[in-house]
């Protein structure tokens, strides 16, 4: 692997950050068990001004098998339904301030779904049935797409 080719990664990721495509990225290239390239770019927390570090932890559940519209419709997305979930997930959702659709609280679907997006999944999308707020996610998706 040439140094010149590895430096293309620098240019590509720097450009993606400059174009606001991503706030930051970590890249690692290994060959035959030896790390040849390992760098962090951009920000881990833009509001706090914290730079991304090579060993920062990323939630990758959805990146390995992205949630589809079918998963949302069929309650197989892995998303839960906080108020009727098992005790563990119910407590996590309550602590995070996530509400269900039947509330008198003055909160938009956008606010709730953005909080829901930070929650852990019950399982990998498509592997099990778990009644969920997937239809709320679809509703928010439709709001965005329809303007």
Image (tube, rainbow, N blue to C red):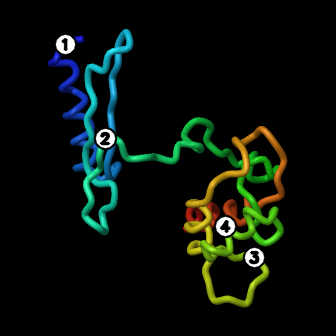
Sequence-wise, the earlier of marks 4 and 1 is: 1
Instruction: Name the residue carrying label 1.
Output: 2
Residue 92 falls in which quadrant of the image? Answer: bottom right
Quote the CA–CA distance across marks 1 and 2: 22 Å
Instruction: Name the residue carrying label 3.
Output: 101
Sequence-wise, the earlier of marks 3 and 1 is: 1
- In the image, taking residue 104 as reference, residue 15 lies left or right, namely left
CB under 8 Å between callouts 1 and 2?
Answer: no
- Image point 30% across, 62% down: which residue? 46
Q: Nearer the viewer, residue 141 or 99?
A: 99
Sequence-wise, the earlier of marks 1 and 2 is: 1
The quadrant the C terminus occupies is bottom right
- Image point 26% across, 48% down: which residue? 17
Quote the CA–CA distance across marks 4 and 2: 28 Å
Q: Position of residue 143 (x, y in %)?
A: 61, 68
- Label 3: few (<14), some (14–19) or many (≥20) C-alpha neighbours in 10 Å: some
The quadrant the N terminus occupies is top left
Name the mark nearer the viewer: 3 or 1: 1
Q: Is residue 8 above or below residue 50?
A: above
Q: Position of residue 62 (x, y in %)?
A: 59, 44
Kindly state the secondary structure of the residue where label 4 is placed. Answer: helix
Sequence-wise, the earlier of marks 4 and 2 is: 2
Instruction: Name the residue carrying label 4.
Output: 92
Quote the CA–CA distance across marks 3 and 4: 17 Å
The disc label shown at residue 95, or none: none
- Image point 71% across, 70% down: which residue? 91
Query: Outermost residue, left direction?
Result: 4
- Label 1: few (<14), some (14–19) or many (≥20) C-alpha neighbours in 10 Å: few
Kindly state the secondary structure of the residue where label 2 is placed. Answer: loop
Q: Position of residue 82 (x, y in %)?
A: 74, 68
Instruction: Name the residue carrying label 2.
Output: 54
């Amino acid at each position: 692997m040439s140094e010149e080719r590895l430096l293309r990664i620098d240019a590509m990721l720097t450009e993606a950050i400059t174009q606001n495509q991503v706030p930051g990225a970590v890249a690692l290239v290994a060959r035959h068990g030896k790390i040849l390239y390992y760098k962090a770019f951009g920000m881990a927390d833009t509001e706090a001004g914290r730079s991304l570090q090579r060993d920062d932890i990323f939630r990758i559940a959805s990146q390995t098998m992205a949630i589809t519209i079918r998963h949302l419709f069929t309650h197989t997305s892995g998303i839960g339904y906080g108020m009727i979930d098992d005790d563990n997930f119910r407590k996590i959702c309550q602590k995070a301030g996530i509400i269900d659709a039947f509330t008198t609280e003055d909160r938009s679907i956008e606010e709730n779904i953005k909080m829901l997006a930070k929650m852990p999944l019950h399982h990998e999308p498509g592997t099990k049935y778990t009644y969920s707020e997937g239809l709320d996610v679809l509703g928010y998706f439709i709001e965005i797409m329809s303007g």
